[in-house]
Amino acid sequence: MVIPDAASNKTFPAGTPIDDSKNKTLLFSPITTKSSTSHNRIVVSPMCMYSADNGYMNDFHLVHLGQFAYKGAGSVIIEATGVEPRGRISPHDLGLWEDGQMEPLKKVVEFIKAQGSVPGIQLAHAGRKASMGSPFAGYRLIPEDEGGWSQDVVSASDIPFDEHHPKPRALTVDDMKQVTQKWVDAAVRADKSGVEIMMIHCSHGYLLHNFLSGNSNQRTDEYGGSLENRMRYPLEVIKAVRDVWPDEKPFWVRISGSDHKNIDSFSRDDDGWDIYQGVEFSKELKKIGVDVIDCSSGGNLPDIKYPAGPCWQVPFAETIKKQVGIRTSAVGIITKGVECESILQENKADFVSVAREFLRDGAFPLTAARDLGVAVKWGNQYERADRERAIPKTK
């Protein structure tokens, strides 16, 4: 897709300070990772929309993701994208397991770039949480006669997530090698489609998290038991993808800071998954060339009471950043510009990943700028709608 110059905001993207000499914030300062520069530190988190057909993007995704780029996000990460059909959460998740899926992806990526934002993608495999319905269509097991694959769900072990999910089959070592190649092939397609940021999903109870956590991994071979063994397969996958991903492009991994077996997020869960194991895993990720750790948590155990509140997962990002010496992105009910700026100023993270607040306010960067008193650029076509809304008024 060719974006006409009249529809492009690439040279002066929305969400860029109009007078950088007056910008006293970190949030609206550029940041460079490898050859990629984001004009601000606001990242659109990957959010499943359950709106694809056979894994293919459509106009919904162009409008949904394109609005965030147009309205000022520094980076836009495309939702969890299955590396194989059975690696989707639902039959309507995105996929990148075949070449035909590249063309609609290119269309979205090119539009994001034309607005001056950096496009990324989260590659994923749902593991034992696959073949389920979307939240808005009824979160339930989807059988084969409705387009599901409930008899072909796989995980580290044959332990179901809960009574409502299918019982998975434990992957054999040969199976694992084949799945690793699926990750590699999908990454190559993403690169060819123009994606700039690669994010590997190791969180939220999906396949790679299934291996990491002793709560879901009961294997007795070299891929289970000790932390070293439980990390082995995720590291094999990530290294394989890292080897084919261009060196000049940023490489992110999303991890879980804790399975939250206990209400205290920093309590130890040595036989399951906790932040202390997350630190050790992140050290290994740094060694193999990961640039940024996106720090989320949970999703691997049912009926967990999360200690949720504003910015509640930020301590995970801070811990990884300070103990590992790697860039991090903070997540978790971050809804205000002042919260974003505080996270950065206090050196708790390098990026701020925002999810549901973008669904409530697609122009979140412009709103955040107003909160912080920063005059920022709007998209050319919308400036006449009263740019003063993004500029603080003086008495």
Image: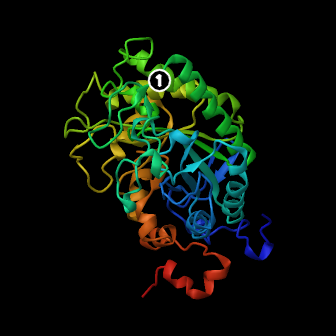
Q: Name the quadrant of the C terminus.
A: bottom left
Q: In the image shown, does 78 or 129 lie closer to the viewer?
A: 129
Query: Local crowd at mark 1 within 10 Å, few (<14), some, or many (≥20)?
Result: some
Based on the displayed image, in which of its 4 quarters is residue 127 positioned? top left
The residue at the far top in this view is 221
Based on the displayed image, in which of its 4 quarters is residue 361 positioned? bottom left
Q: Position of residue 174 (x, y in %)?
A: 56, 18
Query: Is there any visible trace of residue 297 in the rendered image?
Result: yes
Q: Is residue 220 above or below residue 43?
A: above
Q: Residue at x 46, y 52 (%)?
A: 146
Q: Is residue 165 above or below residue 368?
A: above
Q: Residue at x 63, y 54 (%)?
A: 119
Q: Position of residue 33 (x, y in %)?
A: 63, 43
SS type, badge 1: loop
Query: How many labels were placed on the picture?
Result: 1
Q: In the image shown, does 22 or 384 lie closer to the viewer?
A: 384
Q: Position of residue 49 (x, y in %)?
A: 48, 59
Query: Is there any visible trace of residue 124 in the rendered image?
Result: no
Q: Viewed as shown, does residue 94 lie left or right of 224?
A: right
Q: Name the quadrant of the N terminus.
A: bottom right
Q: Viewed as shown, does residue 241 lie left or right of 230?
A: right
Q: Residue at x 57, y 72 (%)?
A: 376
Q: Viewed as shown, does residue 131 lie left or right of 307?
A: right
Q: How is the image coloured?
A: rainbow
Q: Position of residue 261 (x, y in %)?
A: 23, 35
- Residue on which disc 1 sits: 171
Q: Amino acid at mark 1?
A: Leu
Q: Viewed as shown, does residue 264 lie left or right of 37?
A: left
Q: Residue at x 68, y 49 (%)?
A: 195
Q: In the image shown, does 183 or 134 lie closer to the viewer?
A: 134
